[in-house]
Image (spheres, helix red, strand yellow):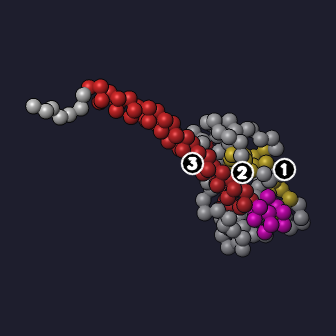
Amino acid sequence: MKRTGFTLVEILIVVVILGILAAIVIPQFTDAANDARDSSVQSDLQTLRSAVELYKVQHCELLPNQTQAANGTITSDAAVANFVSRLTGKTDINGTINAAGAYGPYLQKFPTNPNSSTATIGATPVFGTTDPGAASATAGWFFNTTTGKTTACATVAQTAW
């Protein structure tokens, strides 16, 4: 009588091989998720930087946090909501938010940094002249009010962009 089937040793060898393959493949999927998040941040950052540059070109070198009075005086606006509104809404040539304005919108919606701990923080820009660094727990984006440069912040480890 001939028996068919696998011996215990054959089954153990197959299980060990599958375990080795799983140990090799699973970390690559983890890295792929982190790489996708990094690519998303880089893409959103490039979009945000392009929107700021286009705003500057159309508003005679004014940054989205600035307005210009009729007498030519430039004023900085510290309200984050106005900064976001100037990029997602319409403005006039002086940077005044105006639904009938001739310029904008530059973004459909303000992007959320996926590396931030919450969506609210991720969609919040912070202003200043000194970059708080990648570990800022209060913002998803940093906007330098002197240079107009935008960078990404996050509450989790990331590479620098």
* Mark found first going from the N terminus, 3 or 2: 3
Residue bearing the label numbered 2:
79
Percent x, y of residue 67: 80, 60
How far apart are the two marked residues, 1 and 3, measured between alpha carbons? 31 Å
Against 159, residue 94 (above or below) is below
How far apart are the two marked residues, 2 and 1, measured between alpha carbons? 16 Å
Percent x, y of residue 131: 77, 41
Point out the frontmost of discs 1 and 3: 3
Whether residue 154 appears in magenta in the rendering, the answer is no
Mark 1: which secondary structure?
loop
Mark 2: which secondary structure?
loop
Percent x, y of residue 78: 75, 49
Which residue is at a point 74% across and 50% down the rendered structure image? Answer: 150
Q: Few, some or many C-alpha atoms within 10 Å of disc 2 (few <14, some 14-19, many ≥20)?
A: few
Quadrant where the N terminus sits is top left
* Mark found first going from the N terminus, 1 or 3: 3
Residue bearing the label numbered 3:
36
| Mark number displayed over residue 146 | 1
